[in-house]
Image (cartoon, helix red, strand yellow):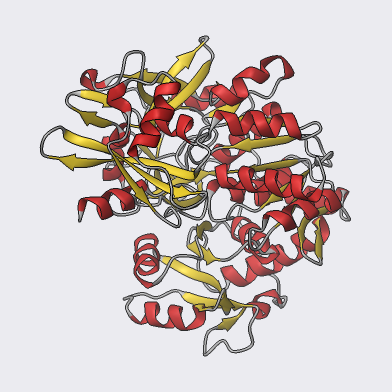
Amino acid sequence: MSSNTPQGRKLIAGRAIRWNEARASLAYERGLWIRRTIADSLREAAQHTPERIVLVDGDVHMNCRTLYAQANTMAQAMLSRTPAGSVVSFLLPNWHEAAVIYMASTLAGMIVNPILPSMRDRELQFILEDANTRLVFVPAIFRRQDYTAMLSRVCAQLASPPEVVVLRGDDTRGHTPYESLLQPLDPARELPALNPDAVRMIMYTSGTTGRSKGVLHTHNTLHALISQIREHWLVEPGDKFLVPSPISHIGGSIYAFETPLLGGTTAVLMETWNADEAVKLIDAEKCTHMAGATPFLQQILAAARAAGTRLPSLKLFVCGGASVPPALIRDAAGYFDRAVVTRVYGSTEVPITTVGATRRDEARYGADTDGRTGLADIKLVDHNNAAAAGEGEICARGPQMLVGYLHPEDDIPAFDAEGYFRTGDLARRVDEHYVVVTGRAKDIIIRNGENISPKEVEDILVGHPHIAEIAIVGVPDPRTGERACAVIVPKQHPGPDVASLGAFLDEHRVAKFKIPEQVVLVESLPKNDAGKVLKHQLRATLSGK
């Protein structure tokens, strides 16, 4: 460790990452970290199973040979433009080209940085500058947004702008056309040897408080993550994952890019979410797995019923990323022919912190808990008696966790002295092995000194006959400190009022102090691309900030 490396970090391939020798050795001993990388897996797949389909994107069915050939050629083009270790960003929908870019970046020893295509000038300028991106891939036009023009504007504001590569469009306006990076170089460049402990991905958090932070993952943290999926999620070679979640989120990226090569699966990509089309794709492609937030499960269940199919090929649906009503899990599990339906919990920093409840003998835990822990070691910490009895903040560590943030100073509040990541989420244990997430620590509403968990009340009220969606947030109140405000998307008008909610919760024997004191009816709740309700936006609006 060099003298200028931040304490607790180790310099690997030019990047300082968080490092604990004892935990690293244990991960290697258990085979969760290995000396190979996914680049080796791609080469071997192209050699041994060249015709196996790894990606389906509409009419495009990409096999191992084609993915490797295109990624190899593009990797050499990347190295002709920027040295190994550089950051390559992409703002792309769920398109097959993203897999080529992702694998090319890996083969070239670059660090890939997926960015949500919903980002606009301000957020994009911050990320490209913060990550020091050297190549950025964008669509020419997507959902009526002109990305070519946006990148021209953004790059004009950067002191050291990246090269912009444009996909699926003829008018690149001076930027580089994607196809030009698929032209073989003569002579071919030698690709670098890869260190499996080197940073492979930077993925930015949503930035709900303060600026977004770049989460660092290595080849090995992602390998451990896929090892956990193979062990706990009923994955077998030949399975197919429907991937409607954005590939720029950690979930979408691992199902689209990692699992096909490390698990022998196929990723069926959806450019735009449509539940009716998803049902058709699952039946037509015989998809076995799907993961997504609550809205995905709600809508696909309704669409399957409307289409008269019970999705017989589906083996597993894992639901996370937002508040998941237990009744929804039970309803879906009862309707689908063979699918195990379970809640899970995780984050970009510690993906798949819990693996759900996927065994037949633990089906009852799939709805009422967020599952058991997998690789992650979890402790629940009650800071200054701020949580309800039996609750605590989830602090987690494991071989699939981040190796720090891009800026080491961001690590200081995020990790405790034992190396646990402080998630900011509250939970309690059930029957020792299972965890129930009860809400965000910052989401807790403190009314007259009493702590109210919004998630507890939301899970009950989502069963109200006149409520389509609900989010409960705390609003400043001069008398009680805070009051609970229920923001509701009604099923019909007029929607429910405070009295209606009070009567419903009283029937469910909920304490009086937990009943919302205010109701606001809206047409829709603000959400991110993964379907998670953006409560900070609701709080800001209701508080007049």
Q: Quadrant of residue 152?
A: bottom left
Across and down, in percent, residue 149 comes to 46, 84
296 vs 233, left or right, is: left
Q: Residue at x 38, y 82 (%)?
A: 153
- x 51%, y 65%: residue: 117
Count how many numbered circles sit on residues in the image.
0
Furthest-top residue in view? 431
- Evaluate whether residue 425 shows in this view: no
Image quadrant occupied by the C terminus: bottom left
Confirm whether residue 525 shows in the render. Answer: yes
At 31% from the left and 76% from the top, the residue drawn is 159
**In the visual, does 10 lie left or right of 491?**
left
Horizontal and vertical percent for residue 444? 29, 32
> Residue 508: percent from the left, percent from the top?
45, 21
For the N terminus, the quadrant is: top left
Where residue 221 sits, quadrant-wise, is top right
Q: Where residue 424 appears, x then y in whole percent?
A: 34, 33
Image height of 130 relative to 445, above or below:
below
Which residue occupies the foreground of this view, 136 or 504? Answer: 504
Nearer-the-camera pick, 300 or 466 = 466
Describe residue 401's horizontal placement relative to residue 33 as left or right.
Answer: left
